[in-house]
Image (cartoon, rainbow, N blue to C red):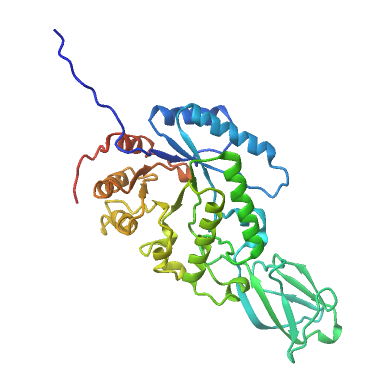
Amino acid sequence: MIPTGVINDGPAFPVRSNILTKMPVAYTDDLKAYVDELADLRYNMIYIPIFVSQDSDQSAKLEETKKIFAYCKSRFIEPSPYFETFGAGTVTLMLDPCLVEGIYHENETWTVSNEGIIDLDVPKILDCQNTSIHISTKDGKELKRYIDFKVLSTNKPKILIEDTNLFNKELVLSYDAVDFSGFPHKASCPSDPHGWEIMENFIKNVLNEFEPKSIHISQDEAGYVNKCSRCLSRGLSNQEIMIDQINKVHQIIRKYDNDVTIYIWGDMFNDLQNAPKIGATGIVKELPKDIGVHDWNYIGVYHSDKMKTVNQMNFYLDKGYKTGGVAWFEPANVLDILLTGEAHKDLFLGVMHSEWARFGQSLLPVAEANWTGKTILGDLKF
């Protein structure tokens, strides 16, 4: 007689996610093979970047993306739209370059050359609907655009003064410069009204076209905030600017869908990571509680300040936010993410796999961790 038994083979975590950074978002055999591989490894969610372009007709790309979504679903992987609502790659910035965050230069004195030219020593200036250059004489007379001066170039900015009486004279200039030379990432302006029109239309279209169960709205790696004339004119602190923008995004989403799950990256609202770098410490207290967090800190368990990844995830978990970790290229990070999740089982979102810069070493370790709740490192403690 053969003894009876029960084989238990089920996932440790209900969400086993991946973000599509390995290859372009295109309906190709390579992409389908990758989705097949994810399905074989029991991943059940994939965040797919939504194509953003200034081209007026994006219908072909939309239909292609819908095919990708359909193929993922056929392999029992739930596709989730990924798009950036604040930070370096914000959809508003992709659709209108004028919506970049500038640095306001106020009342600078410049001397006009004997050819009537002013060459500004910044990489670029904004010359747009809601932010442009202002020039006046030393005694306060405002020069009129197109009559008294022309902007010949916004890149390597060059200004032509028409009045020959002002050649070799000093003028007073105020303008927004675009200069990220001292910062690792760009940023979008969260204060331009046109930007919010674009943002709402984009979010509405994504929700209507894809009818997703969840969306990932990024919110990471802004170079700086509250430095352009549009932001400074509001008289708000950096913290107030950040709180205002996330609440506006949240309100737009909830205007069109009360049920869709919202995820963000964790760095910009984290006092242990990027919030202090933009002068926005403490803003997590205003982050809506129905937003889930993916923490992508990659410190690794082997550093001298060991378990810093754990501490950063706890920053959100201890405040009641559903939180998951992103291992990236270092499989060792899977362990400290799991150790954190074990102590917060009701809030833990599992481990996300990403392949930023084509580093895919964690694909198998993350799959194993999400299915078994364990890693090849066992229960190693620190």
Q: Name the spot of residue 127 as percent of width and height, x first.
A: 72, 68
Q: What residue lies at 49% left-to-right and 70% top-to-bottom? A: 240
Q: Is residue 75 above or below residue 95?
A: above
User: What number of labels is visible?
Assistant: 0
Q: Name the spot of residue 64 as percent of width and height, x first.
A: 62, 34
Residue found farthest to the bottom = 139
Residue found farthest to the top = 1
Q: What residue lies at 77% left-to-right and 80% top-to-bottom? A: 113
Q: Name the spot of residue 285 as percent of width and height, x first.
A: 39, 65
Q: Is residue 92 above or below residue 123?
A: above
Q: What residue lies at 38% left-to-right and 44% top-to-bottom? A: 329
288 relative position to 104: left or right: left
Q: What residue lies at 67% left-to-right and 68% top-to-bottom? A: 125
Q: Give the quarter of the figure containing the N terminus.
A: top left
283 relative position to 191: left or right: left
**Residue 312 location, quadrant:** bottom left
Q: Name the spot of residue 361 as percent of width and height, x first.
A: 38, 39
| Residue closer to the observer: 76 or 33 | 76
| Residue closer to the observer: 286 or 125 | 286
